[in-house]
């Protein structure tokens, strides 16, 4: 199973995410499940616009490299501009987990900071309560409980 994170903190955030899902489907990435929408403070600067994030599940056969190309193309279609790291964006699409594989090099899977991010862990838990981190072998509940109370309280399902 492949888990993909989609987020937006510029423009009509929900519409941007809906369009990203539509374009994923057009590119042959069948979405088999989608989490609820979650709103969080922008990271690392909470003064920037809030994010809305979801996680989707797919069983696509596309390689991680192919997925990355598709994601970059969709982000561009939705108006994402090349700016500084962590700057506000209309759309951000990431591979969270790819068939429980561990990859390093051009692409790092699982996403290297996913285990510290409430906006990834909580929607992922909604989709798969038995998911575990392929590198650390920790289950998703343990990862969520390792977040700070502030991180757990600051995420809002919408």
Image (cartoon, grey):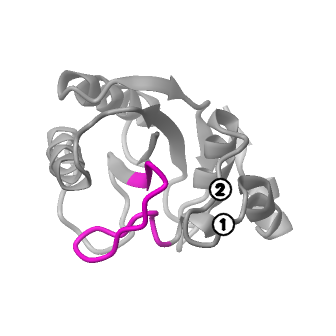
x then y, percent, for residue 138:
71, 65
In this view of the protein, which residue sits in the foreground, 36 or 156? 36
How many C-alpha atoms fall within 10 Å of the one at disc 2: few (<14), some, or many (≥20)? Answer: some
Identify the residue at image location x=53%, y=43%: 52
CB atoms at circles 2 and 1 under 8 Å apart? yes
**Distance Cα–Cα, label 2 vs label 1:** 6 Å
In this view of the protein, which residue sits in the foreground, 59 or 156? 59
In this view of the protein, which residue sits in the foreground, 67 or 156? 67
Quadrant in the rendering for residue 19: top left
**Which label number is shown at residue 95?**
none
**Which label number is shown at residue 137?**
1
User: Quick check: is 106 in the magenta stretch?
Assistant: yes
Please give the count of numbered marks on the rendered protein: 2
x then y, percent, for residue 105:
26, 77
x then y, percent, for residue 149:
85, 65
x then y, percent, for residue 11:
36, 40
How many C-alpha atoms fall within 10 Å of the one at disc 1: few (<14), some, or many (≥20)? Answer: few
85 sits to left or right of 28: right
Q: Is residue 70 above or below residue 22?
A: below
Identify the residue at image location x=76%, y=67%: 147
**Which label number is shown at residue 132?**
2
User: Quick check: is 143 in the magenta stretch?
Assistant: no
Identify the residue at image location x=43%, y=59%: 101
Q: Is residue 68 above or below residue 38?
A: below
61 sits to left or right of 82: right
* Overall secondary structure of the magenta section: loop
SS at circle 2: loop
Identify the residue at image location x=41%, y=32%: 58
Q: Is residue 30 above or below residue 17?
A: above
SS at circle 1: loop
Magenta part of the chain: 95-112
């Amino acid at each position: 199973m492949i888990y993909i994170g989609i987020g937006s903190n510029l423009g009509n955030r929900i519409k941007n995410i809906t369009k990203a899902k539509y374009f994923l489907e057009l590119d042959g990435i069948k979405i088999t499940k989608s989490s609820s929408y979650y709103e969080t403070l922008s990271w690392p600067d909470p003064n920037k616009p809030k994010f809305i994030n979801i996680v989707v599940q797919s069983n696509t056969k596309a390689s991680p490299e192919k997925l990355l190309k598709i994601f970059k193309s969709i982000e561009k279609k939705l108006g994402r501009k090349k700016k500084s790291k962590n700057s506000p964006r209309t759309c951000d699409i990431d591979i969270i987990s790819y068939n429980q594989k561990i990859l390093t090099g051009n692409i790092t899977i699982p996403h290297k900071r996913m285990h510290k991010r409430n906006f990834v862990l909580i929607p992922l838990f909604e989709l798969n309560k038995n998911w575990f981190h392929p590198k650390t072998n920790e289950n998703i509940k343990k990862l969520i409980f390792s977040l700070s109370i502030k991180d757990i309280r600051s995420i809002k399902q919408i």
